[in-house]
Amino acid sequence: MRACDPRSLCLTDGKYGAAFHSFADIPGGVRYGCAIHLDPPLEFEAASSMEISYRGSTELHEKYRLVDVEVEPYENEAGVPEDPAFSKMFLGPSGVAIVRAIKAKKFIRLTRLEVRILKAT
């Protein structure tokens, strides 16, 4: 799982039980408040969302040797087809993404020359 844009409507509207608010850009991400609609309500400040994650980059996956990175479409989730009206907002720009990847079995350290040769082919 990776974070997506914390400012997306499905995370700020409150429809799904929580609402993010009070956004402040910080180096490499965003800080925000979170209100969870319980009785009594629960409110806290989220530490940050890493921009590298919510912008969809696979840089962190690659750093930790994950390959064949794929994002699983929400339309494949069990509850979505059953209640498309409830899920419609969530299917837009979402707050999280389900990511599938495989841990690389071998790690080969290439020289810069080898990398340039591979990119050129």
Image (cartoon, grey):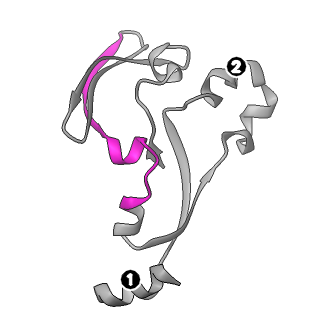
Left or right: 48 in relation to 69: left
Q: Is residue 117 above or below residue 31?
A: below
Residue 86, label in figure = 2
Task: Write the residue at 29% across / 84% down.
Answer: 112
Q: How many C-alpha atoms fall within 10 Å of the one at disc 1: few (<14), some, or many (≥20)?
A: few
Badge nearest the viewer, 1 or 2: 1
- Looking at the image, how many numbered discs can be counted on the residues? 2
Segment tinted magenta in the rendering: 41-60
The residue at the far left in this view is 27
Residue kind at label 2, given as amino acid type: Phe
Q: Nearer the viewer, residue 83 or 11?
A: 11
Instruction: Please provide percent x and percent y for residue 81.
Output: 80, 33
The residue at the far top in this view is 40
The CA distance from mark 1 to mark 2 is 49 Å
Left or right: 43 in relation to 92: left
Task: Write the residue at 54% across / 32% down.
Answer: 94
Q: Is residue 26 above or below residue 16?
A: below
* Residue behind mark 1: 116
Q: How many C-alpha atoms fall within 10 Å of the one at disc 2: few (<14), some, or many (≥20)?
A: some
Q: Nearer the viewer, residue 94 or 59?
A: 59
Q: Earlier in the sequence, mark 1 or mark 2?
A: 2
Task: Write the residue at 40% across / 68% down.
Answer: 62
Residue kind at label 1, given as amino acid type: Arg
Q: Is residue 56 magenta?
A: yes
Q: Is residue 3 above or below residue 31?
A: below
Circle 2 sits in a helix, a strand or a loop, which is it?
A: helix
Left or right: 77 in relation to 121: right
Circle 1 sits in a helix, a strand or a loop, which is it?
A: helix
Residue 110 at least partly seen: no
Task: Write the residue at 44% across / 58% down.
Answer: 58
